[in-house]
Image (spheres, grey):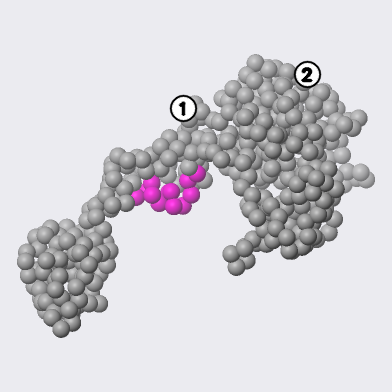
Amino acid sequence: MLPVNQAEQIILDLIQPLDPAQDGETLSLLDALGRILAEPIASSLDFPHWDNSAMDGYAVRYADVQTCAAETPVTLEIVEEIPAGYQPQNTIQPGQAARILTGSVMPAGADTIVIQEETQRSGDRVTIFATPKPHAFVRDRGAYYQAGAPLLAAGLRLQAPEIAVLAAAQCAQVRVYRRPKIAILSTGSELVAIDQPLQPGQIVDSNQYALAALVAQAGAEPLLLGRVPDQPEALKTAIQQAIAVADMVLSSGGVSVGDYDYVDEILAALGATIHIRAVAVKPGKPLTVATFEIGNREQGIGAEIFSSSPRTMYFGLPGNPVSALVTYWRFVLPALRKLSGLPAPWEPAFVRARSLNTLKSDGKRESYLWGKLRLVNGEYEFELAGGSHSSGNLINLAGTSGLAVITLGETQISAGDRVQVLPIE
């Protein structure tokens, strides 16, 4: 069995990110929400676009107001009113001011804003009762961003703030990475569809739904290939179909050492290179990681190869529901981040939390216990999910927001002690 960190490094070293030239597509701005930029963005606009006021008040020459005080106020002539969207028509001369609103263009000749709370207006005159700081409340053109400089970097996932920036920069279309295609199949003759009545010994294929949801949540495109019985030929055909259409394949079940666990054998027969067969992790020890290069992918029953990636990654996840999800969070998700075009680091970002419960392990493998991670008064707390922590108990996984880690050789973390926790979105 490989140590967890070694398995993680092997996986990340195997991943070849999508190519920005071959794997990019141009989308309208709103359609690009959640997608990853395939090329850097620059703008021809300065931000702010012009010198403007940060407050409601009066645009003045600092030289005219630098000696103002309540006892020695200065009165200026108002020569113009400048609302938002208006182009000033006058140059402010000595002894003059312009009424100005927040965001409005600074008039020529003015260099300072006096906020209206420190003034009193009477007709076309305004009296200033306090000296502002030089250049007060003036936002200079280009102070936030100068035209031609990098605006957004390639590899950035576009969320609402980035969409707002691109809209302000008048980028109606952007080039993003395509969504990676992730084939998902479940193995096991005991599996049935969600709408099929259960017979003795049968179980619903929940892994297909869980993995599809996780893949979609990560911004990739799940390709649901259904359930495959424990029959070598059927499994071989399913894997051939999967590697012909996908950048990555996730199968669940069939990777242990049972009489009906055929995945590793079939992968080898199809020309895959198997890099990992087991990891010292609990739950999730029987994890298979393999790669298909272009040549051996073309064994896919004569099907056209739809993925442009030169390599297809294959993850054979355990069949137990909790094991499948834990191995996805710990090993598959970092690989998917790198594949998608996101920049490093791709590894999970653990946090330190105070455990509200005593956590136990046999110490033989790195163990992951699921529960709720909360930020309370600036400190993370971890609360263990109630009930059995069996890899087959999917029920108490509901509401999980963190996986507490008990390292190899460690058998107990006492309540109140700190523990490493992997946050779950």
Q: Position of residue 45 (x, y in %)?
A: 28, 45
Q: Residues within 10 Å of mark 2 (few under 14, many from 20)?
A: few
150 sits to left or right of 16: left
Give the main secondary structure, helix, strand or loop, of the magenta stretch. Answer: helix
Q: Where is the N terminus found, in terms of image quarters?
A: top right
Q: Residues within 10 Å of mark 1 (few under 14, many from 20)?
A: few
Dot placed on the residue nearer the N-terminal end, 2 or 1: 1
Which mark is on residue 292? none
Vertical relation: 208 (above or below) 315: below
Q: Residue at x 73, y 18 (%)?
A: 271
Residue 78 in percent (x, y) is at 11, 71
The part of the image, by quadrant, that contains residue 252 is: top right
Q: Amino acid at mark 2?
A: Ala
Give the residue number, with chain letter if any, for mark 2: 269
Side of 218 where 100 appears, left or right:
left
Q: Can you give x and y, in whole percent of width and height, for residue 50 in the image?
A: 23, 53
Q: Residue at x 44, y 52 (%)?
A: 161
Question: Between residues 372 and 122, which one lies in front from this camera angle?
Answer: 372
Q: Which residue is mark 1?
A: 21
368 sits to left or right of 220: right
What element does badge 2 sit on? helix
Q: Is residue 219 left or right of residue 286?
A: left
Q: CA distance from mark 2 to mark 1?
A: 33 Å
Q: Which residues are magenta?
A: 157-168
Tag 2 near tag 1, CB within 8 Å:
no
